[in-house]
């Protein structure tokens, strides 16, 4: 079972202070402890480092359990320790319950009280895809490979002239927001017989693979996560950006926050590389441009050359994945055009806390006493 994390804050630190990086989470000042309420569920680990699958569990049973608050808090702890958790055959889970569980995972695990589910900034865009029943929901983002193909065909710049570099797929959800997502919950309503796998990589482990002196240096840095495309899409479409988006701090249309490169996960208290790479990461702040590129190349190298840090989901109809964006990146595999069959997914995402780095927090391996080599 996940280990207790109560000694996370007892270590000393040699972090270089950066006054722009918050050092605590006021709504969750200490890591959470697993109570054992989910010990009765059958599971297997995807790899020693990341991921867990519950092959027969219905998440609706957790939501409706007499001790639901305890079970949901424990599930949040397990997701935060393992990075991502898979479920199969969630055919009985409706959109309302998917949203409810995603919201409660954040609420019961120390998220600020006035935060909730994320609202996509361009929900009003005419290209925004409806749910399979034809309705739309401001808290649900719909993925549809067939619809995506049609949209891309109309965009000349999307026509490929050479094989794409898929490393750009790696990202953490909503880092373009001042307060990004903690938990994301994706359910695949429809899937081709193969293709469209999703991969998750452990930011805890990538941090642990770095030398102590390099970790300390990265702890002093922030990165800008700009996403100007939302404002330009809203201007072109003549509609207003949605606001607020799951937090009073996620308002307006700037979409250019700075986040700490190394972040403490509020649930486990463990450090992870957070915005060293990613779709929305524009630049590492306060370094020269070639140093910015060098740092991001190094983080990407650790992701792509250490496949033991990665859990891969081969989707099946009504399978679901829930992950914690503050300690994993994820990447879709854009190969659905090679097979027939649609890939339709529905995703809810909870907004967490303002990213922070507690200088007293430790790494996952330090806490668990696992040597890197
Ligand atoms: Fe994503």
Image: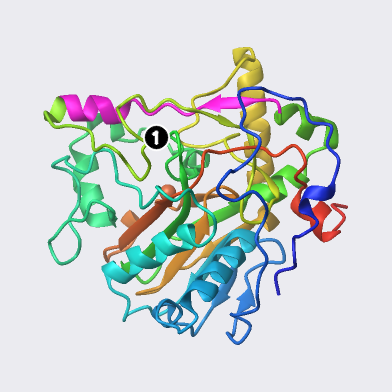
The residue drawn where x is 55% and y is 55% is 200
Is residue 267 highlighted in magenta?
no
SS class, disc 1: loop
Residue extending furthest toward the top? 288
Is any part of residue 335 visible from this angle?
A: no
Q: Where in the figure is residue 145, as x and y percent of width and height?
A: 28, 55
Of residues 69 and 355, which is closer to you in this image? 69
User: In the rendered image of this protein, does residue 318 appear above or below residue 284?
Assistant: below
339 left or right, relative to 216: left
Q: Where in the figure is residue 51, as x and y percent of width and height?
A: 60, 65
- The part of the image, by quadrant, that contains residue 42 is bottom right
* Colouring chosen for the image of the structure: rainbow
- The part of the image, by quadrant, that contains residue 146 is bottom left
Is any part of residue 216 visible from this angle?
A: yes
The residue drawn where x is 77% and y is 25% is 16
User: In the rendered image of this protein, does residue 65 appear above or below residue 116?
Assistant: below
The residue drawn where x is 64% and y is 47% is 203
280 left or right, relative to 145: right
Q: Where in the figure is residue 318, as x and y percent of width and height?
A: 35, 74
- Is the CB of the residue bearing disc 1 within 8 angstroms of ligand 1? no
Q: Which residue is mark 1?
A: 249
Count the numbered circles shown. 1
Is residue 232 highlighted in magenta?
yes
- Which quadrant of the figure contains the N terminus? bottom right
- The part of the image, by quadrant, that contains residue 315 is bottom left
- The span picked out in magenta is 220-235
Q: Where in the figure is residue 95, as x and y percent of width and height?
A: 27, 67
Q: Residues within 10 Å of mark 1 (few under 14, many from 20)?
A: some
């Amino acid at each position: 079972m996940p280990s207790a994390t109560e000694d996370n804050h007892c270590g000393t630190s040699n972090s270089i202070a950066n006054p722009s990086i918050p050092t605590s989470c006021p709504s969750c000042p200490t890591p959470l402890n697993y109570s054992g309420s989910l010990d009765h569920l059958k599971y297997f680990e995807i790899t020693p480092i990341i991921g867990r699958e519950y092959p027969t569990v219905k998440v609706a049973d957790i939501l409706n359990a007499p001790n639901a608050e305890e079970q949901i808090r424990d599930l949040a702890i397990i997701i935060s320790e393992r990075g991502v958790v898979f479920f199969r055959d969630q055919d009985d889970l409706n959109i309302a319950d998917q949203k409810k569980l995603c919201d409660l995972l954040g609420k019961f695990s120390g998220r600020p009280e006035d935060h909730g589910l994320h609202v996509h900034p361009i929900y009003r865009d005419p290209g925004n895809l409806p749910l399979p029943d034809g309705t739309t929901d401001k808290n649900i983002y719909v993925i549809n490979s067939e619809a995506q193909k049609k949209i891309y065909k109309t965009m000349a710049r999307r026509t490929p002239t050479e094989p794409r570099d898929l490393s750009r797929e790696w990202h953490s959800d909503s880092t373009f927001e001042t307060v990004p997502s903690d938990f994301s919950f994706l359910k695949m309503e429809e899937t081709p017989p193969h293709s469209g796998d999703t991969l998750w990589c452990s930011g805890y482990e990538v941090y642990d693979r770095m030398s102590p002196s390099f970790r300390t240096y990265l702890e002093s840095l922030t990165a800008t996560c700009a996403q100007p495309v939302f404002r330009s899409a809203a201007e072109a479409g003549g509609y207003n950006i949605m606001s607020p988006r799951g937090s009073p701090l996620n308002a307006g249309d700037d979409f250019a926050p700075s986040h700490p490169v190394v972040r403490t996960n509020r649930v486990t208290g463990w450090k992870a590389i957070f915005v060293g790479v990613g779709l929305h990461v524009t630049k590492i702040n306060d370094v020269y441009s070639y140093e910015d590129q060098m740092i991001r190349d190094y983080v990407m190298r650790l992701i792509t050359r250490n496949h033991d840090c990665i859990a891969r989901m081969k989707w099946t109809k009504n399978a679901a994945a829930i992950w914690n964006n503050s300690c994993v990146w994820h990447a879709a595999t854009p190969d659905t055009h090679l097979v027939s069959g649609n890939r339709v997914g529905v995703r809810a995402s909870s907004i967490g806390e303002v990213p922070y780095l507690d200088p007293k927090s430790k790494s996952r391996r330090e806490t668990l006493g696992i040597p890197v080599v």
